[in-house]
Amino acid sequence: MGQHDPRIDAYIAKSAEFARPILEKLRAIVHEACPQVEETLKWGMPTFLYAGGILCGMAAFKQHASFGFWKHALVVGEGVPRDGMGSFGKMTRLADIPPKKQLLPLIRKAMKLNEDGVKSAGPRKQAAPRPAPELPADFQAALKKQRKALATFEAFSPSHRREYVEWVTGAKREETRQRRIAQSVEWLAEGKPRNWKYM
């Protein structure tokens, strides 16, 4: 039989009055479906673990409670959108909890996914690469006068070039900008990245 984590007891106890019976019932259904479930807190919310992974979780907010599967799309279906953090929308009363005959098979399906080591569906979002920095005309002119500096700059990765360009263009006064251009050319001629002092 799965253990009850006293931190979850405390979480439920300090939840809003309407949420307590909802959380208690959801917790009982999870334990009924998965007697070996482990309880913990993750991101400050009650979370249920099984077979080395997160099975599902629940949370109480000021005006609603939620319950959701970690592998939502694989458990409830690709076309079923999440509403907030949960798989079943915002719950404000016991009647909002899906019937046990609907929840138990879904929890068992989530258990099987964990047993089989299935990962969540869908590709992870990747940040779009930032475009290469545009070299200001005055900085470019200074670099062209010093071949070694220009060669170093062109050989640098876009992020290293961006550090120099942003340092130069970030100057508020013209004399500061010119001083930074001169310093950049000197460092580049020595083959140094902008933040070489910190390496």
Image (tube, rainbow, N blue to C red):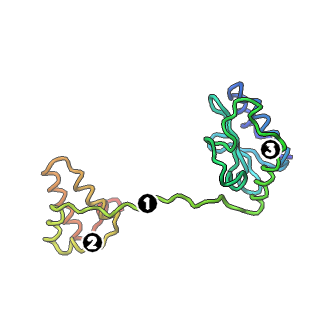
| In the image: residue 35, left or right of residue 40 | right
Q: Amino acid at mark 2?
A: Glu
| In the image: residue 8, left or right of residue 101 | left
Residue at left 69%, top 30%? 92
Q: Amino acid at mark 1?
A: Ala
**Mark 2 and mark 3: span between their CA atoms?**
59 Å
**Residue of label 1:** 128
| In the image: residue 98, left or right of residue 192 | right
Residue at left 34%, top 68%? 157
Q: Amino acid at mark 3?
A: Val
**Residue of label 2:** 154
Q: Position of residue 64 (x, y in %)?
A: 66, 32
Q: Position of residue 1 (x, y in %)?
A: 87, 46
Q: Position of residue 35 (x, y in %)?
A: 85, 48
Which element type, helix, strand or loop, lies under badge 1?
loop
Q: Position of residue 156 (x, y in %)?
A: 31, 70
| In the image: residue 136, left or right of residue 4 | left
User: Of callouts 2 and 3, which one flags the residue occurring earlier in the amino acid sequence?
Assistant: 3
| Outermost residue, top side | 17
Instruction: Say if mark 2 contacts mark 1, CB within 8 Å.
Output: no
**Residue of label 3:** 30
Q: Residues within 10 Å of mark 3 (few under 14, many from 20)?
A: many
